[in-house]
Amino acid sequence: MSPEPATARLSFVTLEQFLEQLPPELKMLHDGGSGASLLRWVEPSELEDPTPYLPEGEFLLTAGLPFLGKGGSAAKVDAYVRRLVGAKVAALGFGIRPYFDAVPDVLVDACRRHNLTLFEIPESVPFAAIGLEFSQLLETGNARVFRQLAETNRQLMRAVLSPRPEHELLAALVQRVPVWAVLVGADGRVRARGHNAGGSNGVEHALLAPLLERLLSGSGPRVEMDSFEQPGSALVFGHPLRSTKDANLGALILGSDAPLTPAQNNVVQSAVGLLELLVRQRTSGSLAPSQLATAVLLHPDSLASGGTKQVNGLKDLLAQSLSSTRSGQMRIVQGIRVDGAADDGPVRELLQWRRLFDTKLVELTEYGFAAITRLRVDDSLQADVEKLGWRLVIGEPTELLGLQASYQRASSLRGRVLSTGKSARVDEVTWSVTGLLGREAGTMLAERLLAPVLALEPDRRDPLLAVLRGWLSENGSWDGSAKLLGLHRNSVRRQIGVLGELLDMDLNQAQVRAELWFALQYVEELAVFSELAGTT
């Protein structure tokens, strides 16, 4: 038989474990076979009948006061011991002095006759020391059990955040508790199974029908019991999974050959609570997101052509999904994964973004995620997300009818975020080609388009760039650019010809001119970058 798990004991130690911690001066006068008994407490008492105040499993200590005078008669002592045995006292400790120099023979005889474990406690070992040793041992044991329970609960929580939460949660449960487990839906069908370490597959589903009927037809928190001859099924007990309105959403059925300990029952209750949370989220959680999705899927033109009542209905559903009000503004947030971001799986990521942005409207995408949130997404929240290895495009405030346009504007900045590795806010971007390109992408464009010119010596490069900038600014006008540059129009024409050959471009094409104009905006920054690179 495998050893009892640490989580099997809670608030108990055995008499044998306790004695191992006590001074060796304690002398056992009779072994009543209670070494494996679980001790609840150590209690000194000098009452003639302490049993009304003793819970089961006590180690009772006495200095013999009840046995003085007539109380020391054989009949009185025998009745005293019989009462202790009837109260299921684990052991009796008799302290030497101040009343007796040795344990009375009548007490030893009575303990042997009724098989009560008896110890002689020398004067050198005070009762207080025995009680303190027990409390310290109990505290140490409980600390170990609580650590085990904490780790078990963490494992259950990790299971809930997995891609298959119900299956993983049952697997974690049967790993920690010696049971087989079956999760059943409200329709009575099996949704998930967990097999115990002994390999038991549980009871055939058809045999569980009476138990299931009681579970799914009753009300309130309860445990329904049954018993079967199959291995691992001497005790079968079921817990209903209920909605917040006490509707039965399913059941968890467990089987074991032995009663569960308090700690194991604690694990089971945690699993039941998490399973209820899962089925509530799936079946009766917030109804607004599903209603909103259904309305938009079935009536995609409702935003553009719907009546006032219909649009207001959508606004209400959207507000409920965002924990906001109908008139509250919202914004689009897009997240882009960069190097170093952890991949925690879709379910955990989805829950993470829902929590961080306080919204139920989150979409996982090929580039990362998109969310609709009522939050402002301040610098603190942005920093928290960036620490996880993500960069954001943060949209401007908008209302329901502006969401699609806001999403498109945010999407146009994703390339910039990818190239710069920095988050961007839509309302802080200059909405021009140069503004959208950003410094890094712009200098890259300048470096590639103007490379043949930039490679020239400064005394030739700079005049050519000045002529190109002046000519383009005057929309290719020879006279206008000549006047602007203070050159003869033939000189401008000749140098533009040289530029066309160097760049291998047809400068008569509007697209070529536009690209060169944008590239020229970043030439000075490119020069700064080159100087910085040369000094590092």
Image: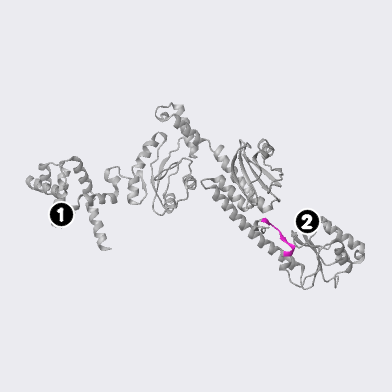
Between 5 and 66, the one nearer to me in the picture = 5
Image quadrant where residue 527 sits: bottom left
Q: Look at label 1 and name its amino acid.
A: Arg
Q: Tag 2: Cα neighbours inside 10 Å, few (<14), some, or many (≥20)?
A: some
Between 412 and 375, the one nearer to me in the picture = 412
Residue sitting at x 65%, y 57%: 5
Q: Look at label 2 and name its amino acid.
A: Glu
Say if the magenta span includes residue 97. Answer: no
Q: Disc 2 and disc 1: Cα gap in Å?
A: 99 Å
Residue 267, compared with residue 220, is above or below; it is below
**Disc 1 element:** helix
Residue 35, compared with residue 526, is above or below; it is below
Say whether residue 347 is left or right of residue 417.
Answer: right
Say if the magenta span includes residue 12. Answer: yes
Which dot, 2 or 1, sits closer to the camera?
A: 2
Q: Name the residue beneath numbered marker 2.
A: 56
Mark sitting earlier along the chain (2/1):
2
Say whether residue 259 is left or right of residue 164.
Answer: right
Between 80 and 113, the one nearer to me in the picture = 113
The span picked out in magenta is: 8-16
Residue 327 visible in rendering: yes
Residue sitting at x 46%, y 27%: 309
Contact? badges 2 and 1 (CB < 8 Å)? no
- Colour convention of the picture: one colour
Percent x, y of residue 353: 46, 46
**Disc 2 element:** loop
